[in-house]
């Protein structure tokens, strides 16, 4: 209900505050698409004159669209068409052999449908991707022609990933599969739009030698050359320039990667993604699986993490990250990005992304400024029990097209922790940055140390204010048994401290998540007023101790009652966990 009301509020706000004319916004969008496409074609920022030339030609194509949808004008355009390469069809027609015409310009669908109504049509049927092509085999058997569009990033059906104008692009292979199955020749079609009117160019027949992959690649290469020669005639709303946001990372669609022997993913322009990640240590740990899923979403992803300087040491350990950009330090050296993704919930995240050269931005519709994203990722949360927070981050990757289901490798630790040489060291973090209600009584932590084997070394991380209270225990058991280390506030210091221990006993705090996400250390985490079902550590080696009392979870930093959620966890409970989970006995 809260999200629904928020959505209405955003909609009403944009309704009353927007000063943009829809036509103006449409032109801005098309201009962005044209600029992006010309950059791909020319491998450089386009001049203004080149952009205007394409926009002008698009106005002519828009006029064709309008005429094709005007019932009173049906048949007029078909009569005006001239042909280039029509002679390639005549031998096939005379021999009574069927054929397929393939096109990429979207407006040709309506045009060819009109032409199919002519007495001696070039094509008899125009079918779409969702249709069953086999139903039209009798048309081919009668020696007639079929036409189909070659869609990029198809919404359904088989597809392959291939090189298109120097970038990795998904293209439907359904038409090629039909051609190979039926054994009919395939002829590419292009429509010139110039002062002389419309000219339908019919290319040389292709077969692909019985290979669906090779035939699809040959068609893509043909149209890539044709578009490069005359980019203004391309349908610039096509998905090859601005693919659907839910198909950008196609790993969950299991599309085949098909490159020639001379090509490689490394030789293509990388798909550069900039992700604004959480600054909070706990949330950053829970966002790691989403970062990995985005990186694996397609083989050409170059993933740059937008973070703060303090969190960079953490993200540098995530093998999914290819580069780093710092908040507030945008520079030309970072290059341009095809996609900017917001996975945190900070209102400033979008503006921080836009400070860099990002072609389009996206994020979940529940984000505070989602109405300003270029694309929205809409995946309503399923009804049921609370879900773990890391799944909300994974949902972003999933909606972009990444595979996240049943992939346990997304949650594996970044590196292995190692115990000190000599005594087996256990880390202890008896404080919490969240508040006092998250702290198990210090006296009980001390009792756990007393009851543990004498051979065990405890490294206790405490604040400067709390250190005095631990000195008597250190004096009692010795400095070699109880090593007091000052609590470090920065991530780099915590990581260095965790690298010196082989296991961890801790309250609900940052240490727990760093130990699990980075090192995969055996961990016992004592939870009180929070909900571990939602924010527990991801590692399978983390054991959570919790007493579910009538007032949990309250998430309060200070307990207004008697701190019963933590007071009901006894020393014996922790010792039993140490013995069973960590192999430590008295």
Image (cartoon, rainbow, N blue to C red):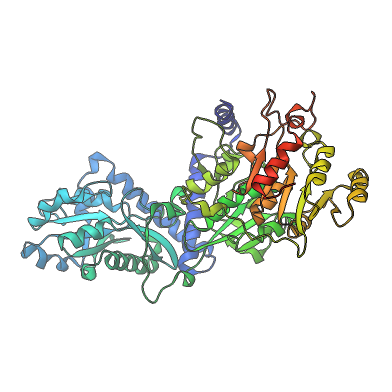
Reply above or below: 43 against 447: below
Reply above or below: 213 against 495: below
Query: Which residue is more in the foreground, 22 or 91?
Result: 91
Place of residue 425 in the rendered image (x, y in percent of width and height, measured from the top left): 76, 56
Place of residue 404 in the rendered image (x, y in percent of width and height, measured from the top left): 48, 49
In the image, taking residue 344 as reference, residue 121 lies left or right, namely left
Name the residue rendered at 86%, 57% in the picture. Answer: 480
Quadrant of the image containing the N terminus: top right
Evaluate whether residue 356 shows in this view.
no
Evaluate whether residue 237 shows in this view.
yes
In the image, taking residue 574 as reference, residue 148 lies left or right, namely left
Name the residue rendered at 55%, 43% in the picture. Answer: 391
Query: Which residue is more in the foreground, 111 or 465?
Result: 465
Place of residue 59 in the rendered image (x, y in percent of width and height, measured from the top left): 40, 52
Reply above or below: 372 against 7: below
When asked about the image quadrant of residue 225, the answer is: bottom left
List the single residue furthest toward the front.
586
In the image, taking residue 122 as reference, residue 478 lies left or right, namely right
Name the residue rendered at 72%, 50% in the picture. Answer: 504
When asked about the image quadrant of residue 557, the answer is: top right
Query: Which residue is more in the foreground, 134 or 151?
Result: 134
Place of residue 512 in the rendered image (x, y in percent of width and height, measured from the top left): 70, 47
In this rendering, the count of numbered labels is 0
């Amino acid at each position: 209900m809260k999200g629904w009301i928020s959505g209405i509020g955003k909609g009403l706000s944009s309704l009353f505050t927007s000063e943009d004319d829809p036509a103006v916004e449409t032109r801005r969008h098309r201009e962005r698409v044209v600029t992006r496409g010309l950059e791909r074609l020319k491998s450089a920022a386009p001049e203004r004159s080149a952009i205007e030339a394409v926009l002008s030609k698009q106005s002519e194509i828009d006029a064709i669209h309008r005429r094709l949808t005007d019932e009173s004008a049906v048949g007029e355009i078909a009569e005006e068409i001239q042909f280039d390469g029509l002679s390639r069809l005549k031998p096939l027609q005379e021999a009574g052999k069927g054929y397929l015409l393939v096109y990429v310009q979207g407006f040709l669908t309506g045009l060819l449908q009109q032409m199919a109504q002519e007495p001696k049509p070039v094509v008899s049927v125009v079918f779409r991707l969702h249709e069953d092509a086999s139903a039209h085999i009798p048309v081919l058997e009668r020696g007639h022609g079929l036409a189909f569009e070659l869609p990029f990033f198809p919404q359904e059906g088989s597809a392959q990933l291939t090189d298109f104008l120097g970038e990795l692009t998904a293209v439907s292979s359904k038409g090629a599969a039909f051609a190979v199955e039926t054994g009919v020749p395939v002829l590419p079609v292009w429509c010139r739009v110039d002062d002389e009117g419309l000219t339908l160019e019919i290319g040389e027949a292709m077969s692909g030698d019985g290979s669906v992959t090779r035939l699809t690649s040959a068609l893509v290469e043909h149209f890539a050359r044709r578009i490069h020669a005359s980019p203004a005639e391309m349908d610039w709303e096509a998905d090859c320039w601005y693919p659907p946001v839910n198909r950008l990372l196609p790993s969950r669609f299991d599309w085949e990667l098909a490159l020639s022997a001379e090509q490689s993913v490394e030789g293509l322009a990388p798909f550069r993604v900039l992700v604004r990640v959480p600054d909070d240590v706990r949330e950053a740990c829970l966002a790691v699986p989403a970062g990995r899923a985005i990186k694996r979403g397609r083989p050409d992803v170059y993933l740059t993490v937008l973070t703060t300087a303090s969190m960079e040491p953490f993200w540098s350990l995530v093998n999914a990250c290819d580069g780093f950009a710092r908040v507030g330090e945008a520079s030309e050296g970072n290059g341009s990005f095809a996609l900017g993704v917001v996975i945190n919930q900070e209102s400033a995240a979008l503006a921080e992304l836009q400070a860099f050269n990002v072609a389009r931005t996206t994020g979940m519709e529940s984000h505070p400024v989602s109405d300003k994203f270029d694309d929205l990722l809409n995946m309503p949360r399923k009804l049921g029990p609370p879900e773990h927070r890391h799944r909300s981050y994974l949902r972003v990757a999933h909606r972009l097209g990444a595979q996240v289901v049943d992939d346990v490798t997304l949650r594996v630790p970044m590196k292995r922790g190692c115990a000190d040489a000599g005594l087996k060291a256990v880390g202890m973090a008896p404080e919490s940055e969240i508040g006092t209600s998250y702290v198990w009584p210090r006296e009980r932590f001390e009792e756990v140390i007393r009851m543990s084997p004498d051979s065990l070394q405890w490294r206790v991380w405490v604040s400067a204010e709390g250190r005095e209270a631990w000195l008597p225990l250190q004096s009692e058991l010795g400095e070699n048994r109880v090593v007091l280390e000052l609590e470090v506030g920065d991530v780099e210091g915590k990581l260095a401290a965790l690298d010196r221990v082989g296991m961890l006993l801790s309250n609900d705090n940052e240490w727990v998540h760093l130990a699990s996400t980075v090192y995969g250390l055996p961990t016992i985490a004592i939870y009180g007023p929070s909900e571990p079902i939602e924010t527990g550590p991801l590692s399978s080696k983390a054991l959570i101790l919790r007493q579910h009392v009538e007032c949990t979870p309250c998430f309060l930093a200070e307990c207004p009652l008697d701190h019963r959620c933590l007071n009901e966890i006894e020393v014996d409970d922790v010792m039993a966990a140490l013995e069973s989970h960590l192999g430590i006995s008295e």
